[in-house]
Image (cartoon, helix red, strand yellow):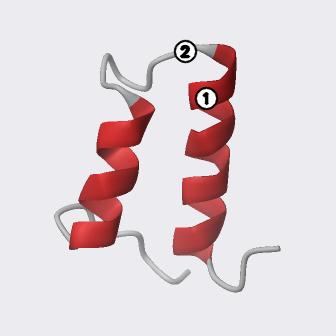
Amino acid sequence: MAKDLRETVKEILGTCVSVGCTVDGKDPKDLQQEISDGEIDVPLE
């Protein structure tokens, strides 16, 4: 279970990977990495 919104978003992106969809035309794995690297900011609220 995720402890914050960032982890929740990454879990949802993992589901996108599982079903084979893209998010705004991007690979969900790439988005997960960008979130981890801090390239994409996920607000706390």
Q: Are marks 1 and 2 in contact (CB under 8 Å)?
A: yes
Residue 16 tag number: 1
What is the three-letter code of the residue carrying label 2? Cys
Question: Is residue 32 shown above or below 37?
Answer: above
Whole-percent x and y of residue 18? Answer: 67, 26
* Sooner in the amino-acid sequence: mark 1 or mark 2: 1
| The N terminus sits in image quarter | bottom right
Secondary structure of residue under mark 1: helix
Residue 7 tag number: none
Whole-percent x and y of residue 32? Answer: 40, 52
What is the three-letter code of the residue carrying label 1? Cys
Q: Total number of numbered labels? A: 2
Question: Is residue 16 shown above or below 19?
Answer: below
Q: CA distance from mark 1 to mark 2?
A: 5 Å
Question: Is residue 14 shown above or below 5?
Answer: above
At x 31% / y 55%, what residue is drawn? 33
Whole-percent x and y of residue 19? Answer: 68, 17
At x 33% / y 63%, what residue is drawn? 35
At x 73% / y 75%, what residue is drawn? 2
At x 61% / y 29%, what residue is drawn? 16
